């Protein structure tokens, strides 16, 4: 069965995003293997999580475009993002020989935001667990799943403040657009949901 035109557009846009991030990533030389893994996990983990998050509000529309494989696609992006995002602090912890890199910092305002990736990882795992238990917690899992958006924002700020790659203007602009799109879509979908409830 040939792909619909909309499906080709979406696949092309997704591949283009990965290629763009790859180009910017390679423009900044890495110092060693750990540096490569740490930066790769952060950038491509965020990108995969962004794509998975953007899919969530359009489940019905994307299902009509792609059919059954869509669910598998969403899971692939989510799992890939989760693995890479987790790989980022693990590689950093091994490099620094410091397990505290997983513990959120609440000692100062700057410390909280600059190390916000730590809390972001925790929120992502809570959201994942909520998704796995969605049949038991029913509608509440969608509320908990919003933690993914908060996690993305924390990870974004973390990258802007202390991320090596965010010194590259291309990375900064690309990831800023990603975070704006994420919240724009979330707000838009919540607005449409609110309007439907008012009519109902």
Image: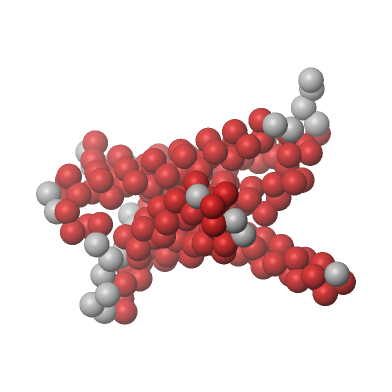
Report how many numbered discs are placed on residues in the image.
0
As displayed, is residue 20 above or below residue 114? above
Which residue corresponds to the image point at 40% horizontal and 53% vertical from the top-left?
125
Q: Quadrant of the C terminus?
A: bottom right
As displayed, is residue 109 above or below residue 18? below
Q: Position of residue 45 (x, y in %)?
A: 43, 45
Q: Residue furthest left?
A: 97
As displayed, is residue 180 above or below residue 3? below
Relative to 23, 188 lies left or right = right
Which residue corresponds to the image point at 28% horizontal and 66% vertical from the top-left?
104
Q: Position of residue 71 (x, y in %)?
A: 63, 37
Which residue corresponds to the image point at 79% horizontal and 20% vertical from the top-left?
1
Relative to 170, 185 lies left or right = right
The front one of 45 and 170 is: 45
Which residue corresponds to the image point at 24% horizontal and 62% vertical from the top-left?
103
Q: Is residue 37 visible?
A: yes
Q: Residue furthest front?
A: 136
Relative to 196, 74 lies left or right = left
The colour scheme is secondary structure
Q: Position of residue 101 (x, y in %)?
A: 22, 57
Q: Is residue 46 visible?
A: no
Q: Residue furthest top?
A: 1
Q: Position of residue 140 (x, y in %)?
A: 57, 62
Q: Give the quarter of the image for residue 63.
A: top right
Q: Give the quarter of the image for residue 32.
A: top left
């Amino acid at each position: 069965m040939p792909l619909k035109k909309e499906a080709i557009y979406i696949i092309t846009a997704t591949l283009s995003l990965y290629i763009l991030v790859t180009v910017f990533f390679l423009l900044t030389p890495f110092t060693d293997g750990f540096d490569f893994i740490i930066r790769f996990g952060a950038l491509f983990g965020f990108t995969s999580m962004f794509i998975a998050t953007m899919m969530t509000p359009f489940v019905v529309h994307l299902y009509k475009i792609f059919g059954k494989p869509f669910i598998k696609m969403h899971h692939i992006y989510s799992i890939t993002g989760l693995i890479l995002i987790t790989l980022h602090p693990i590689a950093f912890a091994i490099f620094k020989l410091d397990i505290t890199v997983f513990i959120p910092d609440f000692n100062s305002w700057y410390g909280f935001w600059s190390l916000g990736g730590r809390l972001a990882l925790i929120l992502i795992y809570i959201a994942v667990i909520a998704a796995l238990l969605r049949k038991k917690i029913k509608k509440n899992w969608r509320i908990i799943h919003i933690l993914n958006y908060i996690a993305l924002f924390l990870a974004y700020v973390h990258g802007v403040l202390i991320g090596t790659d965010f010194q590259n203007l291309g990375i900064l602009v690309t990831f800023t657009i990603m975070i704006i799109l994420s919240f724009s879509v979330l707000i838009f979908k919540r607005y449409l949901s609110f309007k439907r409830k008012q009519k109902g």
